[in-house]
Amino acid sequence: ARPFPAFSGRLNAWVTSWAAQWLMGPCSLEGLAPEDLADVPSNLCGGAGAQVLVHRCRFLEESACASICVNACKIPTQAFFNEEMGVPMRMEPDYETLECRFKFGLRPSAADEEEARSVACFSACPSNGLLRQQLAGEASGARRCSAMGGPTVLRGEGEEEPS
């Protein structure tokens, strides 16, 4: 990314928006939000064109599992861009809309990683039955998904999430 971090981030965003559509689905380029820019150096040129929006991630939709999203996509993809390419990039999946944002120029934060790992499982999660049976005996009553260490309260019709 050196010596042109803003250019590198925008170039990687553009390439990602075109090259990854076969896997993730339709994508578009956007600018980073003002709250994202507050935490980064001013060399991002206002964040224009530094964010890729995946409108509805096929990978997440087909896997129907937040753990697969985090462990097979989010963490490895962030590691590739941040460590191998040297381009700061944070991924933010939205499990409600199945959108995903690739934010070039932003490094993943510890809070972001913790939030991603603590998302509740989907009601259609393929490991739904076995993992929950194994964990049903926890004394606290709050069952955890062994795949991510997060709550296993199901998302779906008629089911409640923890408050």
Image: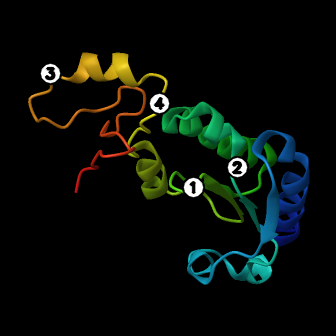
Residue beneath disc 2: 82
Circles 2 and 1: CB distance less than 8 Å?
yes
Residue beneath disc 3: 137
Circles 4 and 2: CB distance less than 8 Å?
no
Tell me which numbered mark, 2 or 3, is placed earlier along the sequence: 2
CA distance separating discs 2 and 3: 40 Å
Q: Amino acid at mark 4?
A: Cys
Instruction: Tell me if residue 122 can be seen.
Output: yes
Which class describes the residues within 10 Å of circle 4: few (<14), some (14-19), or many (20+)? some
* Disc 1, SS: loop
Query: Does residue 41 appear left or right of residue 97 in this picture?
Result: right
Circles 3 and 4: CB distance less than 8 Å?
no
Tell me residue 96's x, y (percent): 50, 55
Quadrant location, the N terminus? bottom right
Camera-nearest label, 1 or 3: 3
Q: Name the residue rendered at 76%, 62% in the picture.
A: 52
Query: Does residue 142 appear left or right of residue 58 in this picture?
Result: left
Camera-nearest label, 4 or 1: 4
Tell me which numbered mark, 3 or 4, is placed earlier along the sequence: 4
Tell me which numbered mark, 2 or 1, is placed earlier along the sequence: 2
CA distance separating discs 4 and 2: 29 Å
Tell me residue 118's x, y (percent): 38, 45
Tell me which numbered mark, 4 or 1, is placed earlier along the sequence: 1
Q: Is residue 39 above or below residue 99?
A: below
Residue beneath disc 1: 108
Q: Name the residue rendered at 48%, 49% in the picture.
A: 113
Residue beneath disc 4: 125
